[in-house]
Image (cartoon, rainbow, N blue to C red):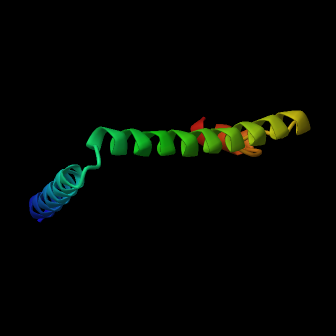
Amino acid sequence: MENANCCLQKTREQRKASRMRGKMVAQHVKGIDVNVKLNSQKYKEQQQNQTALRVIIKAVRYLAQQGISLRGHIDESGIRRIRH
């Protein structure tokens, strides 16, 4: 059953990739350069990633200034009792 699901997933991915290639070829025929389109998409993703990183860095700085841990408080005494 797992192999069947895997095969179905691969088939879906191949169809999706094929549709994407078809769209890119159609855009190229319309006069839109594929490289320009890919570069603009890459630039957009980089901008989104930079924004996300800025938010994360601000949060980490704030937590550090407040002396707050990133993961929260863990009571290690209970863990030690279980291990030993």
Across and down, in percent, residue 82 comes to 61, 43
Report the quarter where the N terminus lies.
Answer: bottom left
Front residue of this view, candidates 21 and 32 = 32
Q: Is residue 55 left or right of residue 24?
A: right
Q: Quadrant of residue 70?
A: top right
Residue 28 percent coordinates (x, y): 22, 49
In this orientation, does residue 81 appear?
Answer: no
Q: Position of residue 22 (x, y in %)?
A: 16, 56
Residue at x 56% of width, y 41% of height = 47
Q: Position of residue 3 (x, y in %)?
A: 10, 58
- Left or right, 63 with respect to 24, comes to right
73 or 70, nearer to the observer: 70
The one of 41 and 71 positioned closer to us in this rendering: 41
Query: In the image, what residue occupies the spot 20% across and 59% down?
Result: 16
Residue beneath the point at 27% across and 43% down: 34
Above or below, comparing residue 65 to residue 73 in the picture: above
Q: Is residue 77 left or right of residue 43?
A: right
The residue sitting at 10% across, 58% down in the picture is 7
Residue reaching furthest to the front: 31
Q: Quadrant of residue 74?
A: top right
